Amino acid sequence: MTHISTDLHDLTVAQLAKALAERQVSALETAQHFLARGQTHNALGAFLDTQADVTLAQARAADARLAAGTAGVLDGVPVAHKDIFVTRDFATTAGSKMLKGYQSPFDATVVSRLGTGVPGQGSGAGMVTLGKLNCDEFAMGSANENSAYGPVKNPWDATRTPGGSSGGSAAAVAARLAPAATGTDTGGSIRQPASFCGVTGIKPTYGRASRYGMVAFASSLDQAGPMARTAEDCALLLSAMCGPDADRDSTSLDVPSEDFTRALNDDLAGLRIGVPAEFFGDGLAPDVRAAVDAALKEYEKLGAKLVPISLPRTELSIPVYYIIAPAEASSNLSRFDGVKFGFRADKYTDLSDMYQQTRDQGFGDEVKRRIMIGTYVLSHGYYDAYYLQAQKIRRMIADDFQQAFKLCDVIAGPVAPTVAWKLGGHSDPLTDYLADIFTLPGSLAGLPGMSVPVGFGAEHMPVGMQLIGNYLSESRLLNVAHRFQQATDWHTAKPQGI
Ligand code: GLN
């Protein structure tokens, strides 16, 4: 096969798909290249499971489809999945000891759609799976330090967190161990790690991507989305990932899949960008602010208008989220009892002791903390005071966004108040929770949001800008991000030694 001059891992998803379709490179060579890279950079801790024989068999099948002219849109392009998606051919742990060695009998819908398709829903995009990526236990965390399998290192500085909970996904893409990865976002877990690792990520509108086969954390918030180096690549993956799946996920929206690449090049002249005052207060580190301000100026050059707006309940999103998410988690995680899935304690006296020992040994501290908070806020006598109040404020937060979208087309601000902090740098969970302040409001409202690299802050760590759109406006968000990436080159920066 003719070889292309650029290193395969430096190609974007779009470029790789083209090279594969034109048979400049084979899916097998591509898979071999990325598997070898994964081994070279093993010390980052990004991968939890790889199965070279499975990956190579998928690559050979992709080559056969490419040769036969029956290929999917991303046929032969490698992808790696956050270990929160269940997979038939790879172990699924959700970053927890509770699911150590768990082998799912089926693939998550998102995995199938990116792969060879959901039975009965047509063929898939044809991507080749490289393996499963480390994440915080049950996606609870902001630094990937809650994984039972050790933290992931940030490719820009190995002493720092890659962010979380999709830390393995962000690190793998930043270190070019995979051209793209899947992530999930309940309160910021795609956007924040994307920001910390200098990659691009999008969380679609709640219900766009099927939750079938995603290990559940907080069901009214969990959403899957892609992480890649460019908005164009995210658009390609997102187009394949989304679409109705009502038989398997009752909250899946009845909206047909879209081609999210169609509006990428639309002109931004006259675009109204809402800048929420509450996202630029005292808590925002000056280095992050400077990078985000510079990006806003760039948008003005591209013809956009900045509109001051207010999201007055931004601060309340922290207590509201940290009541609702643990409440749902406490209910979702009751299924891990030593009977149905994964781990069971070795020694116990009777059934109730078996449950207790299993849950005590299987769950990590943060997961236990959330189960306790969740059961507390749902308990008789406290339900009205906490859970119900939180639900009411959640609605008000969603309404605030609708007020804001009367004045603007998209909202822009920081993803996180600081750049990636040092591993072990936050000694108490509250500090982590507070750092979620800018991603939680959009999550509670169920809105689509993305993170786009806009420069570097202190110690040359990446800074991401958050773009939030109204429901089902992913195509617009990707367009706004893409035009920025056409005009700047922050997204092409590469960590040293990568
Ligand atoms: N950091 C948030 C949490 O710990 C968000 C996690 C997520 O989006 N999965 O819950």
Image (cartoon, rainbow, N blue to C red):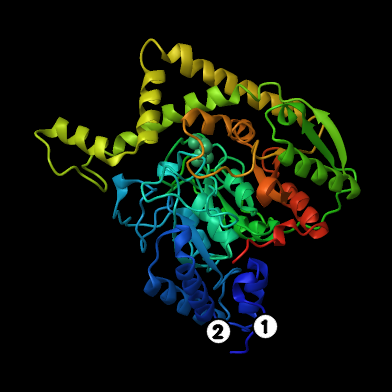
Q: Which residue is mark 1?
A: 5
Mark 2 sits near ligand 1, with its Cβ under 8 Å away: no
**Which label lies toward us, 1 or 2?**
1
Q: Is residue 185 left or right of residue 344?
A: right
- How packed is label 1: few (under 14 Cα within 10 Å), some, or many (20 or more)? few
Q: Residue at x 87, y 44 (%)?
A: 304
Separation (CA) of disc 1 from disc 2: 22 Å
Q: Which mark is residue 67?
A: 2
Q: Which mark is residue 387?
A: none
Mark 1 sits near ligand 1, with its Cβ under 8 Å away: no
Q: Is residue 143 left or right of residue 13?
A: left
Q: Residue at x 41, y 76 (%)?
A: 57
Name the foreground residue: 156 vs 3.
156
Query: For the residue labelled by badge 2, is the local secondary structure a helix, a strand or a loop?
Result: helix
Q: Residue at x 54, y 56 (%)?
A: 171
Q: Is residue 344 left or right of residue 367?
A: left
Q: Amino acid at mark 1?
A: Ser
Q: Amino acid at mark 2?
A: Ala
Query: For the residue labelled by badge 1, is the local secondary structure a helix, a strand or a loop?
Result: loop
| Extreme residue toward the bottom, this view | 1
The spot of residue 274 in percent (x, y) is 79, 34
